Image: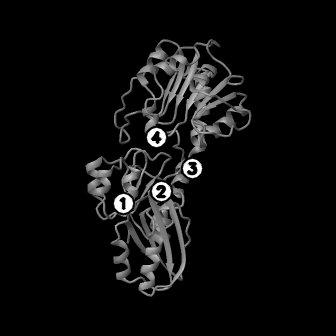
Amino acid sequence: MPTALLLENLHPQARQILETAGFDVVTRTGALDENELVESLAGVQVLGIRSKTQVSAEVLATAPDLEVVGAFCIGTNQIDLHAAAARGIAVFNAPFSNTRSVVEIAIADIIALTRRLTVLDKEMHAGIWNKSATGAHEVRGRTLGIVGYGNIGTQLSVLAENLGMSVVFYDTAEKLALGNARRMDTLDELLETADVVTLHVDGRSGNAGMFGAKQFARMRPGSIFLNLSRGFVVDYAALRDAVLAGHVVGAAVDVFPVEPKRKGDPFESELRGLPNVILTPHTGGSTEEAQEAIGQFVANKVRDHLATGSTNLSVNLPNLALDQRPDAHRIAYLHRNVPGVLATINATLAEHGVNIEGQLLATRGELGYVVTDVSTPVEPAVVQALAGRPESLRLRLLS
């Protein structure tokens, strides 16, 4: 019976799906540090995490039984994808399941900050009645600048237009503008145009520190800033200065460079206590609906990979969408992408009298993945011959 270790309080659907598929499931509510993770992965085939647990090359090197990592979130920068691929460990994430939740909190933040609801709420709780329209605006007619026009950015673009906002966006990749959104040629052009700037970039290392004092200075006086993407892309000391100077009149931040590992741990930030600043504990995608959808999506991908060898939508291995073949035996062979591998596999099978019923090959950069269905059980000599090849990374037999 394969063992799955699920960390960081994943949705119960994930456990239910894996247990129904025959897994022995162990759950932990918090993240684990490197030493704790190394100790916990002995004999574990499946690791399920969210954003806090760091799966480094060193961790992977001590987990020979690990076959798949499920990231129950959008980002995968907490996992060494290259090291996982080199060991034949598939990684799956949930790139779409919580998109709507992030978009809705962005809309909520934009309206709350534009109407200065945080300031009014704080004063009311302090017993102060301060009815005034000063500094409060409608979002209708204002310009939203979206930095990163991917799954979240595009859906936010559509909803913002429905609220009567004008939308401009900037992305380093070529993207199709939806509705009446306009593409800006440079980030500076967007910053000089938008009343509200919101970041929705991914976790690639090149985005580290992309937004600092220079970018805040470029923003229009009296503008609003949101970061619901990655904590390390923004210089928060520079944001604090911009807020205190009154250049930025409101901000919402959901992600931080260093975040507590467990619920209830203390939180420190230079942004605490600032006026009209909304701080949330990395909950942009954390709705019950999103977490259930993520739990189902990633758990199903993990289950299917171990059952059929399917790597469809894996973020680090060549992608093959595979169905279960109950009438055949399956060889799933991950290897370095060098010439002659397919010929070697077929020659080896022919030498041992094994008849091929179906075969699929996919490559991805330095990696190749061949899945071969055969009519008879695979003898140990075949496994030994293929697994012993210099280009071999991982071979699995599936019946």
Between discs 2 and 1, the one toward the N terminus: 2
Q: Secondary structure at mark 1?
A: loop
Q: Residue at x 62, y 27 (%)?
A: 111
Q: Which residue type does callout 3 highlight? A: Ser
Q: Earlier in the sequence, mark 2 or mark 3?
A: 2
Is there any visible trace of residue 368 in the rendered image?
yes
Q: How many marks?
A: 4
Q: Is residue 385 left or right of residue 282?
A: left
Residue at disc 3, secondary structure: loop
Q: Nearer the viewer, mark 2 or mark 1?
A: 1
Residue 209 position within the rendered picture, expressed as x and y whole percent measured from the top left: 43, 29
Q: Label 2, label 3: how many angstroms apart (C-alpha)?
A: 16 Å
- Say which mark, if any, is on residue 148: none
- For mark 4, what is the residue? 204
Closer to us: mark 2 or mark 4? Answer: 4
Residue 30 appears at what percent x and percent y? 36, 47
Q: CA distance from mark 2 to mark 1?
A: 29 Å
The numbered mark at residue 87 is 1
The residue to which callout 2 is attached is 12
Earlier residue among tags 3 and 1: 1
Instruction: Find the residue positioned furthest to the front.
Output: 339
- Taking depth in this image into account, of 113 and 192 the one nearest to the observer is 192
Residue receiving disc 3? 97
Mark 4 vs 1, N-terminal side: 1
Asked whether, in this view, residue 331 is left or right of residue 288, the answer is left
Give how far apart the Cα atoms at labels 3 and 1 are.
28 Å
